[in-house]
Amino acid sequence: MDFIHLFRSFLKEQIEYDENSIISMMKEFNICFQYLTSVVPSPQPPLEYGRYRIAKTEILEAILTNYPPHVETPIHDHGRSIGFTYVVQGCLLNRFYQFQADSKLIIDHVEEVHTGEFIFHKKGMIHATYNPVEENLITLNVYAPPQQDTKIYSI
Ligand SMILES: [Fe+2]
């Protein structure tokens, strides 16, 4: 069984989706780029980045993304889901946004994450993912429950 099939089976066995269980689940799997090269998605217009859903269950969904150099997602939330993003390769600049008292959306803080590191998205947070370097950024994302009613924001 290849890595993706094994990983997909593993995801389908998961019955918990809090922050700690997702982190320990992802650490249990040693995600290396070499295991994922066969399924790294190419960008599909209108998106500037590639997106490949590895698995979706009632509990969670796992999506592999591929951002070419200097591509940024729209500012968005994840609906009612929590999210976990593992950097398989590259550098990820995560811009977190927050509403001010006058309802204006502004950058709250920025986090930079590199190969082998991860970032956690709490329920309700608003962010944009940016690839700031010349190398493609490959990330593995787990959302729990599967994303629904996500919103795009403009400033
Ligand atoms: Fe996101």
Image (cartoon, grey):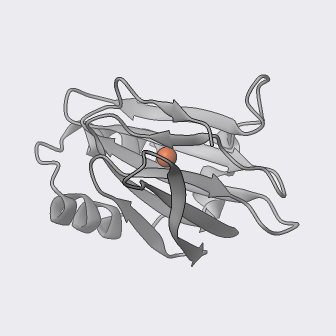
Placement of the N terminus among the 4 image quadrants: top left
For residue 81, what is the image quadrant?
top left
Is residue 91 or residue 37 the one in the foreground?
91
29 relative to 105, above or below: below
11 relative to 91, above or below: above
Placement of the C terminus among the 4 image quadrants: top right
- Position in image of residue 137 (x %, y %): 71, 59
- Position in image of residue 154 (x %, y %): 61, 37
Q: How many marks?
A: 0
Q: Is residue 26 left or right of residue 107?
A: left
Q: Is residue 26 left or right of residue 19?
A: right
Residue at the right extreme of this rendering: 134
Is residue 88 or residue 106 the one in the foreground?
106
Residue sitting at 82 percent across and 69 percent down?
133
44 relative to 106, above or below: above
- Position in image of residue 28 (x %, y %): 30, 67
Residue 32 in sight here: no
Residue sitting at 25 percent across and 58 percent down?
22
